[in-house]
Structures are given as structure tokens and as C-alpha cells.
Image: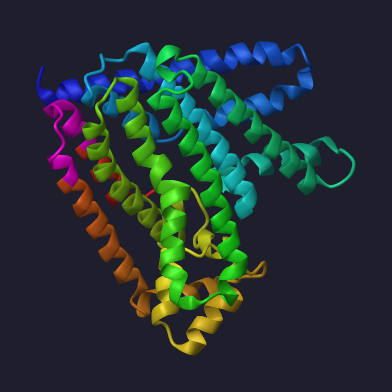
Amino acid sequence: MTGAEQLRDEQADFVATVAGELTAFLSSRQSTMSTISPDIEPIMGSISNLVTGGKRLRALMCYWGWRGAGGATAAQEVVTAGAALELFQAAALIHDDIIDRSDTRRGGPSVHRRFSQLHSSRGWALDSERFGQAAAILAGDLCLSFSEEAFTEIGERAAAGSRARLIFNLMRAEVMAGQYLDILEEVAGPVRDRAGAVSRAQAIIRFKSAKYSTEHPLALGGALAGAPDELLRGYSAFALPLGEAFQLRDDVLGVFGDPQTTGKPAGDDLREGKRTVLIALALDHASAAEAAFIDTRLGSPDLSEGDIQELRRIIEESGALAATEVLINEFGAAAFDALQALPVEELPKTALRRLAEAAVSRAS
């Protein structure tokens, strides 16, 4: 078997095992929840539906961090950690879609939209939108609880005070802080000092997405396998700039991506009012009139297709899109340089390189 075949088979086996772990975990919780009331089933179904798909980036980063630190192939500890990360990701997506008022996720209705539709289809009383959001908040909270339960099942390697536990706890806290900074910038950005907009947007990227998408999962896998501090620092030097490049690519796709590929409406980030690095750079380089147009129309509830096209034009012609692509390339180069220096065997290094290439150049 060639190295490429070994990598492919090992990674596929891990992904399949994590999927099985998630199914078994949620099935056991479904049994518990059904004793409360059969009416709970839609919440459990929404969680199961969300963790069924996705790229498994965080679980895979954790796995190859584990393997790079000498962990055994598909050991139970890293499989359970991968499942815990997927449950946390699902919780973050559910809450993020509520905050962003996003109606779609992976080409279908988002969780709060599914509950709004359930309300309407059953002819229930009161407001369907409010019910949908309230039910989805609870589904996301339940996902967070399940993520903690799953992580605790790892056992001694994830016990209180362990390096892995500290990373897992920090990851969750940073995501919440980053999410708050994101919504704060949406409302305060238009009246704040524009000179600091890019640095504020970069801080949001770092704490809301980059660290929990790549840096913390990779370090978590390493810590579970007993990686020394030097290796964990090397993991961070690789994975943090990779996560920043990954989120910048996501921001570009949120404005210019193909809906058939991304599963989101065209210009979705513009409708949601996201003050990304892309937007901050446009505000920096656009004319006064164009900057005023961004401030007044970004996130407007009545944003038209014409407005979206004009915002795209300003972003592109101001040089913000090109500048963002430069940043993606710079972060990507820093990540690949750090990867090359990692003292790990060739198989995990190759796997991490492929994950990094896919993250930086992806179209969805």
C-alpha cells in the first residue's frame, strides 16, 4: 500500500468511526429524552441532522494532532474527542444562524427556520418566528451539553486540570467571546473609529473562528497523546495562521461565493451585516460616498439585489478583495512554513498539508 493510500484509508476510517460514535451517542441520549416526552424528538432530530454532514475539519485536525504526537491509529480517546468537537461545532452553527438571521445551512433550512416551519405546518398559536428561535436556542444549548458529556467520556486524559481539558475549556470560552465581539461590531462599527476596523475584524476572526477551527483541535489531539510543549507550540504556529486564512476565505465566499456550491444565498454576509476584514478594508479604501453606502446598506433588512451588486462592486474596485486575497496567501504561506518545520512523521504531516490546502483554496 502506498503512503497516499494509507493516508486515504486511515482518514476515511476515522471519519466513519466518528460518524458511528455520534450516532451511538445521540441514540443513547434519544432514549433518555424520549422518556421525558415524545415532543422532544424534533430537537434531537435537528441535532442529528446537523452532525451528519460537514467536512469534519475540526475532528480531522484533532486526529492528526494526535497521530503527529505518537497516538495510535483510531484510538477511542481521539474518536470521542472528534465527536465532542463535532457536537460543539453543531451548537455553534445553530446559535450563529440565529444571531445572523440566516435561513439556510448546507443547502437546507437552518435549525431555527425548521422549527418555524414546524410551527406553521402544525397551525400552532402565537408567533412562528419567535418559537423557531427559542427552540433552536434550546437545541444549541443541548448540543453544548452533549459536547461536554462526550468530552468527559474520554476519561483520565481529559480530566480536570489536564492539558486537554484546559484547551477544550479555553476553546469554548474564546468562541463565545469572539461571537460577542462579532455582534458588537455589527452595531457599534458604524460609529467607531474606522482606523481600527481592520484590527477589530481580525480579532473577531481569531477568537470566533480561527482558534476553534484549527488551532485548538490540533492542540487538543496533541495534548491527548501527551505531546510536549515544543510540539504544541509548533502546532499553534501552523494552525493559527491556517485558521485565519480559512476564515478569510469564508468571508470572501460569503460575499462572492456561488450559492450552488456554498449552500447559502448570494451575498449572505452582506444581508447579515457582517463587519469582516473584507468590509473593513473596503471602508478603508473606498471613497467617502462609497463608505457611507456600505455603512447605511450593510445588514439592512430591505437590502436589494441591486444593493448587493453595488456593495460587491465597491469591495472589488476599492481593492479590498485583492487585499484580502493577499492576506489569505500570507497566512497560508506562514502556515505551510510552520508545517514544514513540525517534528512529526511524514504521514500526519502530509495529511495536515492536504487539510490546509483544502481549507485555503476551498469554494464552499
Residue 222: image quadrant is top left
Location of residue 35 in the rendering, given as x and y in whole percent from the top left corner: 76, 11
Q: Is 345 included in the stretch rendered in magenta? A: yes
Residues in magenta, as a range: 338-352
In the image, residue 33 sits, relative to residue 307, either above or below, namely above
Q: Is residue 258 magenta?
A: no
- Which residue sits at x=58%, y=23%? 146
Work out whether 202 lies above or below 72: below
Name the residue nearer the viewer: 117 or 174.
174
Residue found at the very far right of the displayed protein: 125
Q: Is residue 202 above or below residue 312?
A: above
What residue is drawn where x is 26% and y is 17%?
A: 71
- Magenta-drawn stretch, dominant element (helix, strand or loop): helix
Mark yes or no: residue 176 visible.
yes
Residue depicted at 31% across the width and 15% down the height: 74
Image coords of residue 200 (percent x, y): 46, 64
170 left or right of 141 in image: left
Question: In the figure, residue 189 lies in which quadrant?
Answer: bottom right
In the displayed structure, does residue 7 sit left or right of residue 306? Answer: left
Q: Quadrant of the N terminus?
A: top left
- Residue 63 sits in quarter: top left
Q: How many marks?
A: 0
Tell me residue 212's x, y (percent).
42, 40
What colour scheme does the image use? rainbow
292 left or right of 238 in image: right
Residue drawn where x is 67% and y is 70% of the image: 302
Where in the figure is residue 110, as x and y percent of width and height? Answer: 61, 43
Q: Residue furthest front?
A: 161
Q: Is residue 262 visible?
A: no
